Amino acid sequence: MMMQNQTLTPSELIRRVAEETQCLMDMRRESMENGELPEIPEEQDEIIQLYQNGITLIGKAWDLQTEAAAAREQLRHIAPDEDEADTWELTETQILGILWGLFDTTVRLEALEDRQAIYALTQEIMDFHGLDLRVQSN
């Protein structure tokens, strides 16, 4: 089976990761509002920070720091307006596009710490979307 790679531009990658970040922030806010906190709420905060740092690192790797900073500033910390979508679902192709974009980003980063942060973000996105459950061995 041949696997096709849907390549995202760096700008699209920033936008997609920002959308993922917003989804997590909305989930965190809703859990706080409903009193349905996870066992370790700080873990959610750390994951959200991982995504936010990822946006910054994508900007750094592709020389789009201003665009990355703007994407982070546009993240809202309140409930979405009624006309905004309240859910965020990606197709497998879109998820794979993000992952490929993150791998491309990793090779552009010089600092080991930055590459490790992007790797951790990649792992988190895979876990969040349950990609390990979708892999079938032949």
Image (tube, rainbow, N blue to C red):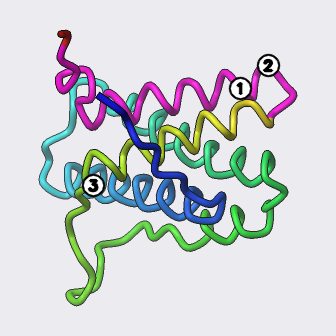
Which residue corresponds to mark 2?
112
What is the spatial separation of the Cα atoms under label 2 and label 1, in whole angstroms?
5 Å
The amino acid pointed to by label 2 is: Leu
What is the spatial separation of the Cα atoms under label 2 and label 3, in whole angstroms?
30 Å
The region drawn magenta spans 109-136
Instruction: Categorize mark 3 by other alpha carbons within 10 Å: few (<14), some (14-19), many (20+).
Output: few
Which residue corresponds to mark 3?
90
116 relative position to 86: left or right: right
- Classify mark 1: helix, strand or loop: helix
Relative to 56, does residue 123 appear above or below in the rendering? Answer: above
Outermost residue toward the top in this view: 138
Which residue corresponds to mark 1?
115
The amino acid pointed to by label 3 is: Leu
Observer-nearest of 133 and 60: 133
Instruction: Categorize mark 1 by other alpha carbons within 10 Å: few (<14), some (14-19), many (20+).
Output: many
The amino acid pointed to by label 1 is: Arg
